[in-house]
Image (cartoon, rainbow, N blue to C red):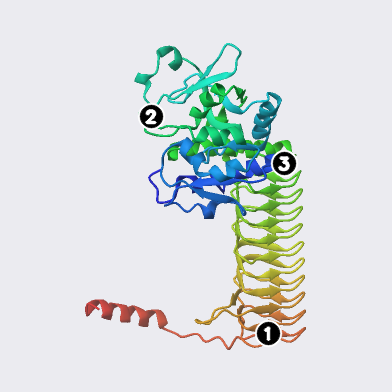
Amino acid sequence: MRSSLPKVLHPVCGRPMVAWPVLAAREAGADRVAVIVSPDRDLTPGLPPDTETVIQPEADGTGGAVRAAHDIVRESETVVVLSGDHPLITADIIRGLLETHRAGGAAATVMTVELEDPGAYGRIVRDESGDIERIVETKDPSQVPPEELAIKEINTGTYAFAGEPLVAALDQLTNDNSAGEYYLGDVLPIFRADGLRVIAHTASDPNVNLGVNNRADLAVVTAEARRKILEGHMLSGVTIVDPASTWIDADVEIAADATIEPGTALRGATSIGADSIVGPNTTLTDTKVGAGSRILHSYAVEAEVGDECEVGPFAYLRPGTKLERGAKAGTFVEIKNSQVGEGAKVPHLAYVGDAEVGAGANIGAGSITANYDGFSKHRTKIGDRARIGVNTSLVAPVTVGDDAYTGAGAVIRKDLPEGSLGVSRGEQRNIQGYAERKRKEREAAEGSGE
């Protein structure tokens, strides 16, 4: 990956790569999920809560990885082995593997797929009954007979095992191969020598074999995961106008009859209510949107937009923003850590930070809450139905009462009582000759070389 970040922590549609198989296993009904890790890699940031980790002391192959979890295997009736860099595995795929495993009375079941170009994948060699005889590793193709290299059915690296015989077989593994590794597939001949059945479960979706070894692979896997996410939402009643230009993370929730316009990215734990329209060209991260709202050409992070709200175009909702039902954050409006009451409007060209805006209030164009004094942030409280005139500066901490007004260009430094008008303008003075004076000052400065 050429990265300081461990491979399996790279995100796929907003979720660490390794979390995909972990969550799939849990959804399929796993009682325990253990992730095998190397001693120099901390995968904890990417693992769902309550995921066990087991250290593999050295990188000695897939068999060595499972041997590192020897105690867990011994305590388990059925063991499913997944690859942490194969994020397209799903709960349904795992359930299908287990159904085949149980129905066949097998000690081991290998998930396989058929590929036109099997490349360096291990080939599945079957016996005359159709059971698996062995898996032929092809890391060194020169050591593999041509008839085995020609086999198109390959091992995906996903297995289901009976726990007890797996323990015994792991103890018999050797690393007598060109790579000097312990291959998990080498337990299969041991099972067969003991009279145990080894069968295949052929997956219908070849994408289960899509692993990630570099960033090009990551892009391919992410594109397929994204396609499936979008398809799932559309089949659940969401209109996605242009899937090719829409990005939706794995944990996003969207209610039926919502519409996602082109150029939109929904990230993290974002949720969208029914009948809402998001986009075009909108990015929402960890943001909750209620029903019947409209968000156009805007950006929001850790914000909450209530039912029937209007946002944008070109609005920026920063963390801690909450718009109550019917509120509006309009064109070139920035709101941070503030609550905008029901039906209140911040129509355009305004900054609202660390404030409480009452129901039905209106904030005029160019108005700001001056919330920072150079040392600390302070809050502004604007009452219900208050009218803040254009280009008003509210110098926090300050309170504007219910039904109060401010005049255009006012600087409000003191609390404004309910129903009153706050103004702060003096007499206009016209200074004659000012432009000529500034011109002479500039010429003098240029002549002196300043």
Mark 2 nearby-residue class (10 Å; few <14, some 14–19, many ≥20): few
Q: Nearer the viewer, residue 425 or 244?
A: 244
Q: Residue at x 61, y 35 (%)?
A: 164
- Residue type at mark 2? Asp
Q: Nearer the viewer, residue 59 or 389?
A: 59
Q: Nearer the viewer, mark 2 or mark 3?
A: 2
Horizontal and vertical percent for residue 32?
A: 64, 46
Q: Nearer the viewer, mark 1 or mark 2?
A: 2
* Marks 1 and 2 in Cβ contact (< 8 Å): no
Mark 1 nearby-residue class (10 Å; few <14, some 14–19, many ≥20): many
**Badge 1 element:** strand
Q: Nearer the viewer, mark 1 or mark 3?
A: 3
What residue did someone put label 1 on? Answer: 422
> Which circle marks residue 238 in the picture?
3
**Mark 1 or 3 closer to N-term?**
3
**Mark 2 or 3 closer to N-term?**
2
Q: CA distance from mark 1 to mark 2?
A: 87 Å
- Residue type at mark 3? Val
Q: Nearer the viewer, residue 40 or 330?
A: 40
Q: Residue at x 70, y 37 (%)?
A: 234
Q: CA distance from mark 1 to mark 3?
A: 48 Å
> Which circle marks residue 176 in the picture?
2
